[in-house]
Image (cartoon, rainbow, N blue to C red):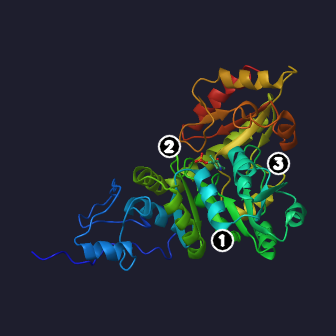
């Protein structure tokens, strides 16, 4: 027998155009081998082999398409990347080992020493640390602004500003940032707007269609949706993603094939889950507003939320995360929140969110515990605040469990 052809066999490929997000979540980007598997294979391999030295040289040289090494490309990882890119409406996606690795890879591939970032002050805690403590060492400075204040975004711009970074709705207070308006300011400043779309996912919000240049995710949360693995992804133009790809393949902030496979399976049920999480969260938020032991509920789906209309204008749902402040006659607000949390029986006490299991978090002493008391106060995170990531258990069971907590106040 002669040597195999250099040509890769035709794959059954789904073309992504003209389909709705639910369909893309199930079908887009699948890689099917000659075996014809219906589900996606996991390519658990570090490297790839060739039928000749010539083919190896041509593949390494980029003259023909093909995989070389899984730090560079891997079919399972690429299948996940194609699927999330299609769902976000972006040209290309690059998967990373975590959400934080996604932000690091973006910053180090798209900026250089002397550049400047304008960042919402209501972003994930590790994002603030990454900019302040580590990205700063490369000579890239970050200014933090109140994301609701458009003048603050505008006046933070410097001649060397290259990136705007935001997250909406924010964690844990559900502050909503106007993506269209901030994107116009970024564009005027010739800076790229990056939106962390972790809380809503493309099932409920598509920042690229609202003017953002790049979307990133902690895939750890809703993209997986079942609390199994850590990972991240960035989505944007071919030009920007080629830069990010260059960094990821060199620095090794890449995603493993096994984790990519789990995320790909997660995307298949994403739209369905996000709708169910959102429906339950809205009903739970409305119920909590009625409870005498609750002082205030933060959820962008409530008509009482000060930015409800803005949220409705850029989101097709409000997501599964809400938070509430408990009332207490006790001067010790933390003790009251802890009593409420500890009296529940079913709900998980954990820092994670975006899981099928409902979770409860006391932000002041966990996710936001490393901030100074003054910084927490400035951010509006009080000691009586409790965050709920509403899962997919029966809503009446979730309410009954929270009722145990409220009864303990
Ligand atoms: C969890 C999270 C991150 C960080 O992602 P990891 O996967 O934990 O690295 C970034 N942004 C938001 C909004 C998050 O919730």
Q: Is mark 2 within 8 Å of ligand 1?
A: no
Q: Indicate the position of residue 323 as horizontal and vertical percent values.
A: 73, 39
Q: Is mark 1 within 8 Å of ligand 1?
A: no
Residue position marked by numbered label 3 in the rendering: 304
Q: Residue at (72%, 53%) from the top-left corner?
A: 137
Distance CA(mark 3)–CA(mark 2)? 31 Å
Distance CA(mark 3)–CA(mark 1)? 27 Å
CB of mark 2 within 8 Å of CB of mark 1?
no
194 relative to 326, above or below: below
Residue position marked by numbered label 2 in the rendering: 226
Question: Between 224 and 160, which is closer to the camera in this rendering?
Answer: 160
Name the mark on residue 40: none
358 relative to 80, above or below: above
Name the mark on residue 209: 1
Q: Indicate the position of residue 238 as horizontal and vertical percent values.
A: 56, 75
Question: For mark 3, does the 10 Å Cα neighbourhood hold few (<14), some (14 to 19), or many (20 or more) residues?
Answer: few
146 relative to 344, above or below: below
């Amino acid at each position: 027998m002669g040597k195999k052809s250099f040509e890769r066999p035709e794959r059954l490929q789904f073309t992504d155009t003209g389909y709705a997000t639910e369909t893309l979540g199930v079908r887009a980007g699948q890689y099917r081998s000659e075996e014809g598997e219906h589900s996606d294979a996991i390519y658990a391999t570090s490297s790839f082999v060739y039928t000749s030295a010539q083919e190896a040289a041509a593949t390494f040289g980029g003259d023909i398409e093909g995989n070389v090494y899984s730090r560079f490309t891997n079919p399972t990882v690429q299948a996940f990347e194609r699927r999330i890119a299609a769902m976000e409406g972006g040209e290309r996606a690059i998967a990373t080992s975590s959400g934080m690795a996604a932000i690091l890879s973006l910053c180090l591939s798209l900026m250089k020493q002397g550049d400047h970032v304008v960042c919402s002050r209501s972003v994930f805690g590790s994002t603030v640390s990454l900019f302040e403590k580590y990205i700063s060492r490369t000579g890239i400075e970050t200014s933090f602004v109140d994301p609701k204040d458009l003048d603050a975004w505008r006046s933070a711009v410097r001649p060397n500003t290259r990136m705007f970074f935001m997250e909406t709705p924010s964690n844990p207070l559900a502050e909503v940032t106007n993506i269209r308006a901030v994107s116009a300011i970024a564009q005027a400043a010739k800076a790229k707007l990056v939106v962390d779309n972790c809380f809503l996912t493309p099932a409920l919000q598509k920042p690229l269609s609202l003017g953002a240049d790049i979307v990133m995710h902690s895939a750890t949360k809703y993209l997986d949706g079942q609390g199994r693995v850590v990972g991240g992804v960035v989505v944007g133009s071919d030009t920007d993603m080629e830069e990010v790809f260059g960094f990821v393949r060199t620095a090794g902030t890449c995603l493993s094939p096994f984790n990519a496979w789990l995320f790909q399976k997660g995307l298949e049920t994403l739209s369905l889950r996000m709708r169910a999480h959102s429906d339950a969260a809205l009903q739970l938020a409305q119920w909590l507003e009625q409870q005498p032991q609750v002082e205030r509920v933060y959820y962008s789906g409530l008509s009482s939320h000060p930015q409800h209309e803005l949220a409705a204008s850029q989101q097709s749902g409000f997501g599964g995360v809400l938070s509430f402040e408990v009332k207490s006659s006790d001067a010790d607000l933390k003790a009251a929140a802890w009593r409420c949390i500890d009296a529940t029986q079913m709900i998980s006490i954990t820092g994670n969110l975006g899981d099928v299991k409902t979770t409860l978090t006391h932000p002041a002493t966990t996710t936001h515990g490393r901030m100074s008391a003054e910084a927490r106060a400035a951010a509006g995170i009080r000691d009586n605040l409790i965050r709920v990531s509403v899962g997919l258990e029966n809503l009446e069971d979730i309410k009954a469990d929270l009722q145990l907590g409220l009864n303990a106040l």
